[in-house]
Image (cartoon, rainbow, N blue to C red):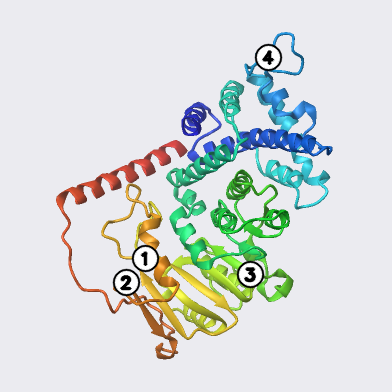
């Protein structure tokens, strides 16, 4: 039901003059979904308060409640305060009336929560922050009415419904990669994130941080991992809700989506800040600013201005290298990290790369490097590695694992958790295998600190692929090319 509803919503938004790409579809679907989710959340909290004999203070004023402006229902004949579930078309706004109400009344009302909220760690503040960043782009009030009617059919009351909803929202975020080059920045494949989280193994009481939070995939998976591996007390739940997950995000759309994603997964007031992480001078970072766990896939290939580079001891325009310096500084002594970065970081010969590798090896224990094949990030052939390290002691040995698969990865053949199962098993005891080996740091060249992932166990064999496999890969590449072309045409 959820999946078909999302497809139908996309079809409607595709026809609207104000929405031109998958990015717009996700953004506009997000704020409508959020208000429907908020209404269901309020109903759940009200019911829980009544059961325990407590008073529930409602967040949204009656005029702006979902069942008043978005989906007023016909009353059951002769039964006051009940509904037969059918839309009351006499009360439901549509056309210009609906669009004007949303633009001129609803959004300004919701923006004010940012000022009136009691504190930053409340859902009220997050409502204000989200609607300060957003605007309604749906130009036709009739299209907006159709989308609202579809969203109203969705339910977020049971655990199963919320899980399905959050899973499909993740799928929507993933599809943003088809909307242009920048869309892919928001999404790291979930099998890879789950694997990184398993290896780092966050615990109750850890403060967990992602300074390039994007769609908040790392924080969401860390939340799910902790819930799965612990019997949570009331105190634990409070800790997870308010004092565990922290993030920063520079881009407006990614910030909104990351916040929404965490709320849909059950973190009501995510500690995500809309800011340029790299604008923080790392010389000013104190102990109170540090974290136990850092999980991130910072954007690579970007360039930062000279004034931003002044915030770092190792000067470089490469965004990912600045982020890595930031993460090292942000870790507490004994803190653990799992960071995705381009594999060229291991071997680049420029001064910044050499200095950064030296800093990492001397200030942290870089105990594990996961070397990934090209195609892990759908639509991008770039090769990446994952650096696992612990701060506070120098590296003595680095254990490498090279993920060698019998297929080419891409949109039609994505990475899955089974692909990474051997890595997870071997990483616990740093075992050698055909795909893994250890390097003694004492043997590394101290002029270059080269950490190239050169597998000494890999057999030099050329495997000829069967024609069917080659044709399937060609078909996949054609589909990816068609998606990119369609996205470009939509933006014109």
Determine the residue positioned at 83% across, 37% down: 53
N-term mark: 3 or 1 = 3
Tell me where residue 186 appears, x and y as whole percent: 52, 52
Q: Which residue is mark 3?
A: 292
Q: Secondary structure at mark 3?
A: strand
**SS at badge 4:** loop
Mark 2 Cα-neighbour bin, 10 Å: few <14, some 14–19, many ≥20: some
Q: Which residue is mark 1?
A: 422
Q: CA distance from mark 3 to mark 2?
A: 30 Å
Separation (CA) of disc 2 from disc 4: 64 Å
> Local crowd at mark 1 within 10 Å, few (<14), some, or many (≥20)?
some
Give me the disc on residue 435.
Answer: 2
Asked whether the beta carbons under mark 2 and mark 4 sit within 8 Å of each other, the answer is no
In this rendering, would 321 be left or right of 43?
left
**Which mark sits nearer the N-terminus, 1 or 2?**
1
Dot 4 corresponds to which residue?
74
Badge 1 marks a residue whose secondary structure is helix
Residue drawn at point x = 52 percent, y = 39 percent? 164
Question: Foreground: 252 or 460?
Answer: 460
Residue 196 % position (x, y): 49, 63
Place of residue 456 in the rendered image (x, y in percent of width and height, measured from the top left): 29, 79
């Amino acid at each position: 039901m959820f999946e078909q509803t999302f497809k139908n919503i996309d079809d409607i938004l595709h026809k609207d003059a104000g929405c031109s790409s998958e990015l717009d579809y996700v953004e506009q679907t997000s704020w409508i979904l959020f208000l429907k989710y908020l209404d269901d959340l309020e109903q759940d909290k009200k019911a829980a308060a009544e059961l325990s004999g407590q008073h529930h203070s409602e967040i949204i004023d009656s005029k702006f409640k979902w069942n008043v402006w978005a989906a007023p229902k016909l009353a059951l004949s002769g039964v006051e305060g009940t509904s037969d579930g059918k839309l009351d078309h006499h009360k439901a706004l549509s056309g210009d009336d609906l669009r004007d109400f949303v633009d001129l009344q609803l959004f300004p009302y919701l923006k004010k929560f940012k000022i009136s909220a009691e504190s930053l760690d409340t859902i009220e503040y997050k409502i204000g922050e989200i609607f300060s960043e957003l605007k309604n782009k749906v130009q036709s009030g009739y299209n907006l009415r159709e989308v609202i009617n579809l969203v109203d059919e969705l339910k977020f009351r049971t655990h199963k419904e919320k899980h399905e909803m959050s899973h499909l929202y993740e799928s929507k975020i993933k599809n943003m990669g088809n909307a242009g080059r920048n869309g892919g920045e928001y999404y790291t494949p979930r099998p890879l994130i789950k694997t990184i989280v398993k290896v780092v193994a966050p615990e109750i009481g850890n403060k967990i941080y992602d300074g390039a939070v994007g769609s908040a995939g790392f924080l969401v998976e860390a939340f799910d991992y902790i819930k799965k591996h612990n019997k949570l007390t009331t105190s634990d739940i409070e800790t997870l809700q308010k004092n565990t997950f922290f993030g920063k995000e520079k881009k407006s759309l990614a910030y909104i989506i990351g916040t929404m994603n965490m709320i849909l997964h059950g973190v009501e007031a995510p500690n995500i800040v809309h800011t340029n992480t790299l604008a923080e001078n790392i010389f000013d970072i104190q102990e109170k600013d540090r974290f136990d766990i850092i999980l991130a896939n910072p954007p690579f290939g970007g360039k930062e201005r000279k004034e931003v580079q002044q915030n770092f001891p190792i000067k470089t325009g490469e965004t990912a290298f600045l982020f890595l310096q930031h993460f090292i500084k942000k870790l507490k002594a004994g803190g653990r990290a799992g960071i995705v970065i381009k594999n060229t970081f291991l071997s680049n010969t420029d001064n910044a790369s050499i200095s950064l590798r030296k800093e990492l090896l001397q200030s942290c224990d870089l105990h594990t490097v996961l070397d990934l094949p090209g195609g892990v990030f759908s639509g991008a052939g770039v090769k990446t590695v994952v650096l696992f390290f612990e701060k506070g002691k120098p590296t003595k040995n680095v254990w490498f694992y090279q993920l060698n698969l019998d297929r080419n990865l891409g949109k039609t053949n994505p990475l899955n958790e089974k692909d990474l199962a051997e890595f997870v098993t071997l990483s616990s005891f740093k075992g050698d295998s055909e795909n893994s080996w250890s390097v003694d740091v004492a043997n590394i060249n101290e002029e270059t600190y080269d950490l190239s992932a050169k597998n000494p166990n890999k057999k030099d064999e050329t495997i000829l692929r069967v024609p069917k496999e080659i044709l399937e890969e060609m078909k996949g590449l054609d589909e990816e090319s068609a998606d990119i072309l369609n996205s470009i045409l939509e933006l014109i």
